[in-house]
Image (cartoon, rainbow, N blue to C red):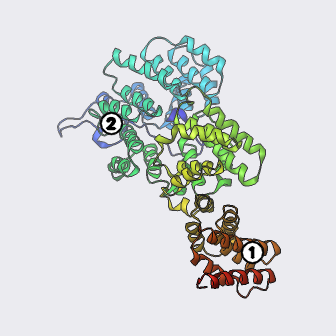
Amino acid sequence: MLLSRTKPAASNNNHSLVNLSEITKAQRMAVSPQEVPSVTKFIENRDFQGAITLLEYQKLNENASTETDLWLVYCEFHRGNYKQALLQYEAMNNPLYAACCYFYLGMYQESRELVLKSPKCPLQVRLSFHLAHKTGDEVSVLEFHRQLRDVAEDQLSLAAVHFLRTNYQEAIDIYKRLVLQNKDLMALHVYIALCYYKLDFYDVSQEVLSVYLQKNADSLIAINLKACNIYRLYNGRSAESEIRPLLEAQVNCPFGKDLLNHNLVIFRNGDGALQVLPPLVDVIPEAKLNLIIYYLRQDETKEAFDLMQDVNPSLPAEYILKGIVYALIGQETNNKEYLDTAIQYLHLVGGSASECDTIPGRQCVASAFFLQRQYEDVLLYFNSIKSYLSNDDTFKFNLAQVQTILGHYKEAEEELVTIQSAKYRSEYNYIECLTRCLVMNRKAVQAWEIYSRMETSAESLGILHLLANDCYRTGQFYVAAKAFDILDKYDPNPEHAAAKRGACVGLLQMVLAGREHREALSEVVNLMRGSPDPQMDHILRVITNWAKENRVKM
């Protein structure tokens, strides 16, 4: 995660990052009262704080040596206290190790300057390789890549850069080869599991990770990754139960706490996002993306757009998110430039070799075609992934809207009535879409019931207009007459009056043809009585005379 730092650590901030290996006291070697472990034993158990305590005691009570100071700064570096280690390495005039501290602090320019002053050695090559990647110097990346040796340290650096460039399979190949060469490098299983997680193979990731957890059951990084796999495979509640012991243990690791608190927000579907995520935006790369997603879910598109401005996407998920943000802000502001940018990002993901046959990739292409109003193409892509998203309300709503646009009203109604989300069911677009489908499927009475449950508002007026016009066009004159009657009272004008008359006459014709119940005519007659319209009075007399002749009670 530290290799992914996006901005340098503030120079006046004394809050240092702690190495993720320093997680719980349980990691420390069990000792008897008669035995005090050596510095070497502490370091072998990666208990750098314990080693520092012993070294400082020796420094105070024994004859300190230069070797003691070297071990002290080594432990400070490996426990994540890079600022303290930097001060000590600079005092020792060791530019290469100081450059490593600057690198982990995200201060790449300062690191590069010291690297250039350092003697050529394998560590200098590896650090130069990482700096070239971080600063986007592709020529230097290739140059230092050629200088890497076929040894574990150099190959681990190569795998790390592959990982950061999303070349996860290449990283896996290197890690697997190293595992075969040295089975004692147990942490490689975590790296492999993380790569599989990034490739969406969560069950495979879990299987690989279990090998490491059998021997390191209290590893924060491994437990956190296990929880993330469970979140993807099952749900947030199960994932939270995995990390809860670590949260309750009050882990003495600032970065570890940040990581756990960040993921807890995700597992809880955004609960506490505004309290946790903003301070982590420049510490955990995913924090900014998740904060953007939170703003989108709260319909705070402007805030999401502002935060998205300095995100330079490199991963498919980042391109997708940027495309979504630009699509939403483009629709809200009617900005064609933003919409074109959204279309570009979405097609870029959907057309890539790695994503074209994935569900997100096809959703991207479908979304781009939707913005381009190529609805037949949208439906083609949606149908290709429909079986995988049968329980996804968002997908079903989008599919139903496209089906409605294309006139596939029966299929659209089937999708709409299965949507469970209260949020979607209360949206105007959903109500409008379902109302139209019901009318077109000749279920106008059900559509009228939807309108009847709405409170008086601009939205209910829009549904009333839709009902009146669609019912008239489809010959469902009973509901059309009632809808135009209300519209005529709300906004008296010749068009509404004429439509109301036409609906009443149409209803009479439907009754005469036996295609409508006579009781419907009786209710419409009540709407016609007392009308100041002389033409309506004439229609009323015709209906009344017919009713008397046919002994129909009005």
Q: Secondary structure at mark 2?
A: helix
Q: Is residue 319 visible?
A: no
Q: Secondary structure at mark 1?
A: helix
Q: Nearer the viewer, residue 253 or 365?
A: 365
Q: Residue at x 64, y 50 (%)?
A: 407
Based on the displayed image, in which of its 4 quarters is residue 151 positioned?
Answer: top left
Question: Does 243 appear above or below 53?
Answer: below
Question: In which quadrant is the C terminus drawn?
Answer: bottom right
Please give the residue where the numbered disc 2 appears in the rendered image. Answer: 54
Residue at the limit of the structure toward the right, as seen here: 494
Q: Nearer the viewer, residue 69 or 104?
A: 104
Inspect the image, locate mark 2, and give the three-letter code of the amino acid beneath it.
Leu
Residue at the limit of the structure toward the bottom, as seen here: 530
Please give the residue where the numbered disc 1 appears in the rendered image. Answer: 501
Based on the displayed image, in which of its 4 quarters is residue 5 positioned?
Answer: top right
Based on the displayed image, in which of its 4 quarters is residue 340 positioned?
Answer: top right
Mark 1 or mark 2: whose residue is earlier in sequence: 2
Inspect the image, locate mark 1, and give the three-letter code of the amino acid beneath it.
Arg
Within 10 Å of the Cα at label 2, are there few (<14), some (14-19), or many (20+) other Cα atoms?
some
Question: Does 153 appear above or below 386?
Answer: above
x%, y% of residue 500? Answer: 73, 74
